[in-house]
Image: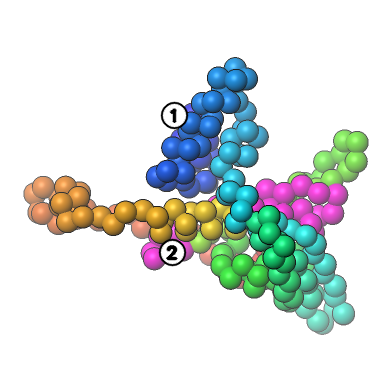
Amino acid sequence: KGLGSFLDRHAITLSGERLRTVFHEARELIRQRGGIDEADLLALTRPTQDRYWSVLGVTATSAGIEQAPLACARLRRGTSAEVREETATGSGPIAAIYRAIDRVTGLFPKAMDYQARSVSDIASHAQVMVVLAYEHKGDVRNFRGSGAATDILFASAQAYVDAVNQIEQWLIERQSRPAVTRAEAARAADPASGQPLPRPRQRTAPTDPEAP
């Protein structure tokens, strides 16, 4: 129950073997430490190290008031030496960075929410949260990413890539699901009509495609 409510609260989707693995790892942490917090759960639900994206650097420049900002994003794939770099323009510097990241990953999700705040402790830094919507074969899901850095552009890129990694993990899990048999489909049908029950459609709020 606790893990399920955590996943719903953070818009994280896990299924099959991945969900069972996270459950057992969380239970083991509780056994060792006597408890577990959300930071531990966020770490456990991150995509595996060998395939997630990490941000190496981002830049954004503007040549003038009438010209759109130009951004560059450099990302590394997993723990390998594979580094990809792309440039893009946008309505603002953060939107341009997100479009550059889209070109690197090839996913192109829709930004539904963006929040940033400044935190002052030993050194001031920015904390950013984004929510991305992604559709795959008619199934629309929201993914929440977070990032923190002294530079707001870098923190924004971290948050976006965090959500992108969750999207990739979700896609991998969908592909690994076993095909539904006819018998299973029949059991899911309405006993009265013999027809499958309609699934509720998920809707996402419209957003400016250039907005972060």
Whether residue 5 appears in this view of the structure is no
Location of residue 24 in the rendering, given as x and y in whole percent from the top left corner = 48, 31
Mark 1 residue type = Lys
Q: Amino acid at mark 2?
A: His
Residue at the image position 53 percent from the left and 32 percent from the top: 25
- Please state the horizontal and vertical placement of residue 182, each as a whole percent of the image: 17, 56
- Image point 56% across, 67% down: which residue? 107
Instruction: Give the residues in magenta.
Output: 135-163
Residue 39 vertical placement versus 185 (above, below): above
Please name the residue that numbered disc 2 is placed on.
Answer: 136
- Image position of 38 with respect to 194: above or below: above
Question: In the drawing, does residue 60 fall left or right of residue 212?
Answer: right
Residue 76 is a magenta residue:
no
**For residue 158: magenta?**
yes
Query: Regarding mark 2 in the picture, which secondary structure is present there?
Result: strand
Q: Nearer the viewer, residue 15 or 160?
A: 15
- Determine the residue positioned at 65% across, 56% down: 78
Location of mark 1 (residue): 1
